[in-house]
Image (cartoon, rainbow, N blue to C red):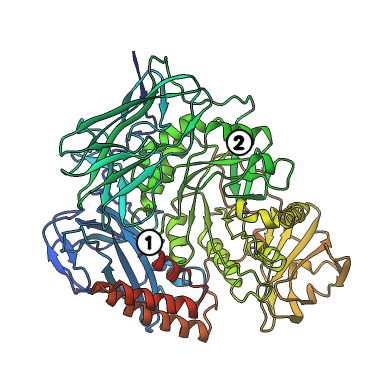
Amino acid sequence: MKFTIFFLALFSITVDIQLAHAASDKVLCDFEESAKGWAGGQLVKKHATVGEGAYLIPIGKKSTYTCSGDWSAYRHFKIDVINPGMVLLANFRFFDTAGRQIMSFEYNVYSGRTTQHIRVDGLRNNFGIGEGIDTKNMAKLEITLKNRHQHDKSKDGIYLDNIRLSTRPTEAFRDYVDGKPVGDIKMELPDGFLLPEFPGMEAGYHTWALDPNRFQLLCRPGTGRDGKGRALEMKPLAVNKIKFWDGVRKFPKDGTYVLSFWAKGALGSSIVDLSFQKKAFKLSPEWKHCTYEFNKKAGSTRRFVLEAQNMSGKSVFVDDLVVYLKGGKGSLEPVSKVEQKPSVVTWADGIIYINGKATFMLGFHRGNPDVFRDSPFNLCLPHELLQPDMSFLDKCAKYGLYTTVNLTAPMRAIAPESAGRFAEKYKNHPALFSYYLCDEPDHSSPSAVSEPTVLARATEILHELDPNHPTSALVIPWCASNMYRYRDAVDVLSADRYAVEGTANNKNLWTVWRSNEAMRRSGTEGQPNIFTPKSPGNITREENWSQAYMCIVAGAAGITWFHYDMAKPKWDDFVELGKELREIEEYLVGVELERGLKIEGKNGVRAIGRAGKENTALIAVNIKPNQANNVKITAPFLAHAKTATVMFENRSVPVKDGVIIDSFKGLERHVYIVDGLPKGVKQRKPPRPGDPTVTDAGAAWRVDIQASFAGRSADDVKRDKDMQTQISKAEAALENGDRDTAKKIYEALLKKYPDAQDIRERIRSM
């Protein structure tokens, strides 16, 4: 007997984006008749996405486009890209007529078709971190490509088409087979089915693999052994073996279990099951059925680890991977045992509501529900790269905690259609906070990358099936443009800036504020930001408190530290900090007040105003380790008050015409509370699913987060120039195959600029 699982959510969207454009789009180049304005490439008649013409940009060459005009009324600059080779990196540099330039760089470009999205407002404010360029007077675009891999034999480059300006958000990815969008997918499963929770490879894969980075794991339609479904393709780029694995699984019954899968690969390659006495299956170019039996006691566990070996630059494919109980009945997949109402998560003006209550999210990655119960933390995240089992969600529900369901693996595999199964399985769980679409999708490693368009497609599917829960993702903020790039693709965006040094004299901790500020400025539709700072055991109290308040003054809706195990040596400090934040939660989720806020003098103080139900808060923190004396803070929303109580410090300060003068130790925070509310403050009603995410609450005190602002000092400009010079030298060494020289250049840069996370990522992915 067999049963069939149908994947819902693959609802048909039949409008072909190759032929249809919104009326508001402005096409700049379609390459049908000419490549006017372009240099460094070639007009061709293949790989077009609209019409017949496209523009070929070769690897290692700089191509330029004279793009004069006013772009300021548009949201995105979009380019359709066809990449016939392996994953590569594309850099986009924009110039205005005054010669100012902005780099939107390190964009991973998949094999096949993608659409690159670059936010125009990000060009205007240097992606939220400083002075940008004049988007009303654009002049030129430069594109460079790099980072081919040793098994990639394609040398031609990428093909561009349909270059346009658009007012629309990120376009959702579409998989096509025989020219038609992918339809419903089904898979027959054996009785006694246990693994994986997301079966075969039809719904992506339920495993994670990252090291040693130079490979891809893909689940593309049409690759299955029947020629129609999805198989897992392990594609080597510069490695000879690839390992993938599942989380630890519990066997619910005594009996004989069967591991069954189909595989194929080049002669000489093999699949080795490292979880069962290194059992090896030799492969051939034809599909081969691989299976074995094993006995397990009820309650015992196993983690399945498989490795493709001796790949010789050729892909190995795995399909229909299942584990089932021999002679079993029905499905043994775990189901929830809790009986509570499903959670409902909404948001507006950057604030999160859970079951109608404004809530500041606090928690840890790799969390432990048993530790978090009765604590100030309400978000208990599983390992960020493995799917939590149902018992984890049930335990969170029991303790009043919330968690996420992880879709990182299928998103990296370009299988966003699999999101439908996740929604059907988890949407009614009381502990569900969000669908965590991807961890670090902007990673420089091709094995980890996931394009915004893929995440946007999963968000589209999940919104249709489950309007009660947001999607989320976490990006690496080493490149500010990535925060803008992914913001449209998910509802709740996170970033993981790790600047802790284990010293009270931390000169780089301020970058946590800068990353949060960029996150806030990217969220022009009221999307929340839940930031992820680091929580190592050597963190000082100054660093711990300061980085949390840096998130808060830049408008974060929550904090999720990375990670719980690292935080154990200072756990009492984290609990104390969590309790403090819960004490002021009314203001952390209150109406934002910022218009007219001004901090005078050269100091590291940053602040934000928040209206509670009856009182007003001014929350300030010194983001630098230097003492700041007699700092003058002008906050017009405090003009109605005469005195402010400084919470947690047993003192008060005078307020005169909305001005507070106070001193700050290095990395110190002050929380000022005054009685009453400023005029024009309107409380926000709890939003329901589908309600507007930008409200008129506090509109009179809101600042324009899209506006340009002064942020790049002369030292910043000098540093950027120095880094780009050295990076160019390292890239030239890599082009010549000299990895040792490139690594030495990067390591010297990292020693000079310890907070340069982009350099750290380059070293990590070499």
Disc 2 crowd, CA 10 A, few/some/many (<14, 14-19, 20+)? many
In this orientation, does residue 613 appear? Answer: yes
**Kind of residue sitting beneath label 2:** Ala
Q: Position of residue 227 (x, y in %)?
A: 19, 33
Name the outermost residue toward the front. Answer: 277
Query: Residue 320 appears in which quarter of the rendering?
Result: top left
Query: Residue 316 appears in which quarter of the rendering?
Result: top left
Q: Nearer the viewer, residue 211 or 29?
A: 211
Residue visible at 51% across and 28% down in the picture: 300
Residue visible at 43% across and 20% down in the picture: 331
Q: Position of residue 133 (x, y in %)?
A: 43, 76
Q: Nearer the viewer, residue 333 or 211?
A: 211
The C terminus lies in quadrant: bottom left
Q: Nearer the viewer, residue 301 or 457?
A: 301
Tell me which label, 2 or 1, sits earlier in the chain: 2
Q: Position of residue 43 (x, y in %)?
A: 13, 66
**Kind of residue sitting beneath label 1:** Ser
**Label 2 residue SS:** loop
Instruction: Tell me how far mark 2 sits from mark 1, CA to CA.
Output: 33 Å
Left or right of 292, for residue 39: left
Residue visible at 45% across and 54% down in the picture: 488
Relative height, residue 524 to residue 420 (above, below): below
The N terminus lies in quadrant: top left
Disc 1 crowd, CA 10 A, few/some/many (<14, 14-19, 20+)? many
Residue visible at 56% across and 61% down in the picture: 520
Q: Which is closer to the viewer, label 2 or label 1?
A: 1
- Point out which mark residue 431 bears: 2
**Label 1 residue SS:** loop
Relative height, residue 342 to residue 23 (above, below): above
Q: Which residue is mark 1?
A: 444
In this orientation, does residue 133 appear? Answer: no
